[in-house]
Amino acid sequence: MPPLDRLQHYVSVLDRERGKHAHLPASQLVAEFEEVKPRVARDDFRAMNMPLEGTIDLHAVYWEVRRWRNDAERETLATTEVVPVVPGEDEIFELVMRARAAPASTGMKGGAAARLADLAFETAAENRERFLLGHGAMRTGRTAYPHQVKTAKKFFETMHGVGIVADEVGLGKTIVAGLVIEELLSLEPDAHVLILVPPNLRGQWGDQTLADFFGRPLAWKHGKEALRRAAFDPVVLFSLDEAKGDGKDDALATTLLQRNWDLLVVDEAHDCRNADSIRFRFVYALQARRRLFLTATPLHNSGYDMFTLATLLKPGCLGSRSAFAARYMDGERVLKDSEGLQHTLEDLMTRTLRRESGLRAIPRKIKSIKVSAFKEEERALYDELLLLLRTIYRRHMGASAQVMRPSARPQYLSQFVLIAMLVLREMASHPRAAIHTLQTALRRKVKELATITRDDADLARLDDFIARYTAPGKWDVAHHAKSERLLLETDELLRTGAKFIVFVNYLKTHQIIAELLAERHPGVKVLSYEGSLAPRDKTRIVQRFMEPWPPSCLVSTDAAGQGLDLQAANCVINYDFPWNPMRVEQRIGRIDRSSQESGELRILNFSTLGTVEEYVQI
């Protein structure tokens, strides 16, 4: 084994060079080892089973040499009596803060701060309360915030490798996960890690969190190699929906289920809160020694959400569903003993609020925009549709469908009501957004009812309504009270230099709003983001939106409502209000990030008075 001092020199040079290149010719790399003679360097690498020939993969070689260095350090410690001088926690924090605040002329930039932190944690290796190797693994120029390091340590030391990180939106939960992954791989180099994320976050994890912050090479674009990577790669990243498959003998899901993982990371874990879903069953079945769930919003519509996530993480920790209901729940949604539940979950869940993180709290300026100046034809259309739906419902109240309540008890609702609510919400968004549902799902249901009763009067009335509603020239998109008010608000936002995101619920509205904005503001990049886009197109749109020039805005469905870092914007417009209140906080979280530079965030909430949309918002 090469001497420790030369191994440390190789690690430093490789770390520096991998920040510039992914690969280097062997001769050029040898030349970078200025303090070591070329012949000696080649002999050392040959002894480590890595002959310096051809083109060198800097990331792979870095991690291998680092492993040799760690082994050499352990051998040295085993044969030498070492008494480490351990800096105090306050001293470490003061050194890092001083390094961050120092002017550029001193040469003490982020990289120096990272090296100080690395040194501090390595010398504290004998004291588990003040040491985290994962932080030392961050690339030159990167440092974690103190609350992120604290949370990563808590995951290992207090939560014993099983827990939910529920930090507020924008505080960097993915960096916490990166620290946890690097800490595990520092302690157990042969560990296997599975990371499951929403589809639109794969690039952010693969290209930013793990690659950019920690320099860990990760192939997240799998394609035909998906099965091989799932079976053999030590660190594997998949979207949860891709990994779970359809629940029927899917080859990828089967491969992942057959492996024994040392760490499972699930980002936006609240997507698994439905115990009847394939997502829940798949994650539950995975074999993992440690489980880390990330979610800023563990509770959505019911206290049972917390029961489901805790059960998925640590089965049985909250008892049976009925026992949980008796102790903590008041009805289907309300927690009656939230403090008691928090106490029970102390070792299973950690949550850092922005005011506790030491980061700057960015004030939010919230504006409610209530649309009431309807066109006469708009009001007549909505009232006629509402009357028609009420008449059909009263005549056919018996046709029901089973819906599972949060407590897992079934409830029977009229199938017609479910479709009618969707139509009314679409109508409040934009009259054209409801056309497809009127012509397909709603008409099919009314036709089915007519077949049962042998009375097609309601079907005839609905067909007449659809014919008049979809007549050529009807409902010019440019003459609609809610969209007109949106254009007026965007005029003011663009005048003041704001960069904004418009969130809508329906694809037709999404298309209409994007077209109206592009027509009204020809000098502005109007970008569209929605779930059916290919991953590369989503990444490209986000990159274009983050560019400082020319001015741009983003029109999106809830596909961009969670996980993405869109801190270039400083305004969120909730054009359509979601049924789930936590989605509002997730949307705002796209711009309320730790890296947000704006002095104020603007939130605009639209609602159309006298419609089901107003009821939903209330």
Image (cartoon, rainbow, N blue to C red):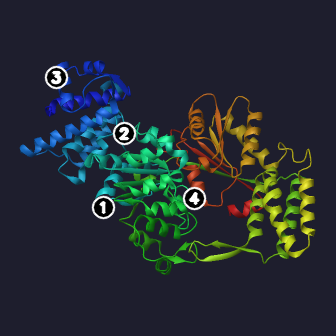
Whether residue 37 is visible, yes or no, is no
Contact (CB < 8 A) between labels 2 and 4?
no
- Foreground disc of the pair 2, 3: 3
Q: Residues within 10 Å of mark 3 (few under 14, many from 20)?
A: few
Whether residue 443 is visible, yes or no, is yes
Q: Earlier in the sequence, mark 1 or mark 3?
A: 3
Q: CA distance from mark 4 to mark 3?
A: 60 Å
The spot of residue 391 in percent (x, y) is: 87, 71
- Foreground disc of the pair 1, 3: 3
Front residue of 90 and 559: 559
Q: Which residue is mark 4?
A: 582
- Foreground disc of the pair 1, 2: 2
Q: Secondary structure at mark 3?
A: helix
Q: Secondary structure at mark 1?
A: loop
Q: Which residue is mark 2?
A: 214
Tag of residue 279: none
Contact (CB < 8 A) between labels 1 and 4?
no
Q: Earlier in the sequence, mark 4 or mark 3?
A: 3
Q: Residues within 10 Å of mark 4 (few under 14, many from 20)?
A: some
Q: CA distance from mark 2 to mark 3?
A: 29 Å
Q: Which residue is mark 3?
A: 40
The amino acid marked with disc number 1 is: Thr
- Foreground disc of the pair 2, 4: 2
Q: Residues within 10 Å of mark 2 (few under 14, many from 20)?
A: many
Q: Which residue is mark 1?
A: 158
The amino acid marked with disc number 3 is: Val
